[in-house]
Image: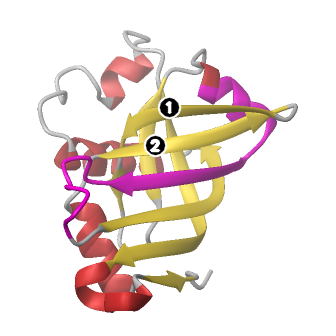
Amino acid sequence: MKQQILKYLRSQHLMSLATTKNNKPWSNTAYFAIDNDLNLFFVSPPDADHSKYLSKNKYIACSIYDSRQKVNSQKEGLQLKGTVKVITSVPEIKKALRLWNQANPGAEKFINYDNMVKKVISSKIYKIKPSLFKYFNEALYGDKETKTYKPSR
């Protein structure tokens, strides 16, 4: 199932990220990348609402789906929950930025390590470590529609 999830996630670019702070929810959309261990990475400024919420509460939920799906088509998408942290290790930042720019080409000249160091951009790299995936795939699973997957950590 891990390979099916990886294949699906690599075909998508946007996620809806849900955060909370003091029992107040917030949702945002972010471009993401994924590594072979099913960790997701996104880039965000630390003063964004969701980033501020994440600094107080590391638990998140995400939805990833193709919004062009028709209501009468076979559905595919996933939901996940897990934890998130800001990456601080230089090698991990560079790896995450490489993955992010490969998944989301066109911003490499702006969203890169040098611009972060020079403070041209204030964005940080966030790493989501999923604890549970709920994968919707009516073409594969028929009437059951979904399967859950817990990554081994």
**Residue corresponding to mark 1:** 28
Q: Determine whether 101 is above or below 53 in the image.
A: below
Instruction: Locate residue 36: give its quadrant.
Output: bottom left
Q: Amino acid at mark 2?
A: Ser
Where residue 131 appears, as percent x and y from the top left, is: 63, 71
Classify 10 Å Cα crowding around label 2: few (below 14), some (14-19), many (20 and above): some
**Residue corresponding to mark 2:** 16
> Image check: 49 left or right of 114?
right
Q: Which residue corresponds to the image point at 24% horizontal and 73% vertical from the top-left?
A: 7
Outermost residue toward the right in this view = 22
Q: Determine whether 30 is above or below 102 in the image.
A: above
User: Decide: marks 2, 1 in contact (CB < 8 A)?
Assistant: yes
Quarter of the picture holding the C terminus = bottom right
Q: Which residue corresponds to the image point at 36% horizontal and 59% vertical from the top-left?
A: 34
Q: Which residue corresponds to the image point at 55% horizontal and 81% vertical from the top-left?
A: 151
Where residue 25 appears, as percent x and y from the top left, is: 71, 33
Where residue 70 appears, as percent x and y from the top left, is: 19, 55
Q: Determine whether 87 is above or below 110 in the image.
A: below
Q: Which residues are drawn in magenta?
A: 50-73
Identify the secondary structure beneath mark 1.
Answer: strand
Instruction: Locate residue 31: give its quadrant.
Output: top left
Identify the secondary structure beneath mark 2.
Answer: strand
Q: Which residue corresponds to the image point at 43% horizontal and 21% vertical from the top-left?
A: 117
Mark 2 or mark 1: name the one nearer the start of the chain.
Answer: 2
Nearer to me, 53 or 41 = 53
Q: How many marks?
A: 2
Q: Amino acid at mark 1?
A: Asn
Question: Is residue 54 within the magenta segment?
Answer: yes
Quarter of the picture holding the N terminus = bottom left
Label 2 vs label 1: CA separation? 6 Å
Q: Is residue 88 visible?
A: no
